Image (tube, helix red, strand yellow):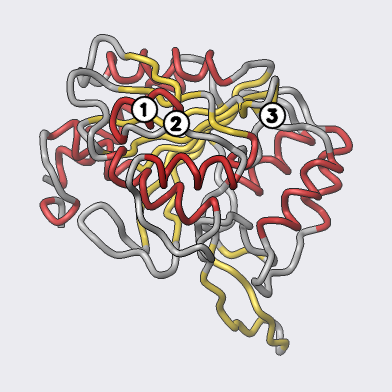
Amino acid sequence: MLVEWSNFIDRVRNFFKARGYTEIHTPILQDFPNIDPNVEPISLDVESCGKRKRVWLHTSPEFSMKKFISRTPRNVFQIARVFRNRECGKLHRVEFNMLEWYRMGADYRQLMEEIGDLLGFLGIAGDYEELRLEHAFEEYAGIILSEDEEIFKNNLLAYGYQFDDKESWEELFYRIYVDIERKLGFERPTFLTHFPARLSAYAKVKDGYAERFELYIKGVEIANGWTEETNMEEIKRRIEVYRQSRDLPVDEDLLQCYENFPPCAGCSIGLERLFMVYMGLSSLEELY
């Protein structure tokens, strides 16, 4: 298995280098945490030169890579060990390997095509399909998705779903979404698209939809990518929303990089999950 893993990583690396991407490496320890509403970072107390300070293990190399491309706009990729607190299960680990890349002047659709090429290069799949998120809700859960909380709750009641009135839109969405995910990508890899603006992460929003995707293969989420939002004030607003109720400091240097941030698209892939598909396995437990 270790030999197969080594060869797999070489093939992924060669794919991007053959396309002119530059491989970079950024620090695992960060002075500021990644801020993501669905991911919990891990902090550490370290001592350096007689001074103690709090640092963070990166949950992805995203913020460091964005600082890099704001100074040196070019196509880059990275294969990094990342760390996320409170992760458990057959598809989750606190520590795992992530592939992340940024393509200058591209949008999310061009990244979807590139992932399709990667899957073909690895011999995983020869084609893929696209499915709008609202259509996935209708097809697999029988629910009409709405970004309006009151309308969404009324739709749920109409279809017989029970819930607590105090549950938020996001809580209800993800309760249903986890069941939908398990049904995706069995005939061929499936890109979910047209996420509502409130699920935009750091993606550009156009006509009420985030320009982002999630890729599923055999019920497993493999990739998450988007056309990058480049407006500093909008990024600042989202960070404030995402850190609500959490004592997480804001990286002002990251915000400053948006003064000169290039139009681009970025994507991350959990490499152990992709390797599972590559090897025909069903659980991370089969890898270790």
Identify residue for label 3: 204
Identify the image quadrant of the N terminus. top left
Q: Amino acid at mark 1?
A: Glu
Residue 102 appears anywhere in the view: no
Q: Secondary structure at mark 2?
A: loop
When asked about the image quadrant of residue 269, the answer is: top left
Pick the residue in front: 254 or 17: 254
Image x and y of residue 276, in percent: 19, 40
Pick the residue in front: 200 or 6: 200
Residue drawn 44% across the image and 28% down it: 133
Q: CA distance from mark 3 to mark 1?
A: 25 Å
- Above-or-below relation of 161 to 24: below
- Disc number lying in front (2 or 3): 2
CB-based contact (under 8 Å), mark 2 and mark 1: yes
- Disc number lying in front (3 or 1): 1
Does label 2 or label 1 sit earlier along the sequence?
1
Outermost residue on the top side: it is 126
- Above-or-below relation of 190 to 258: above
Q: Amino acid at mark 3?
A: Lys
CB-based contact (under 8 Å), mark 3 and mark 1: no
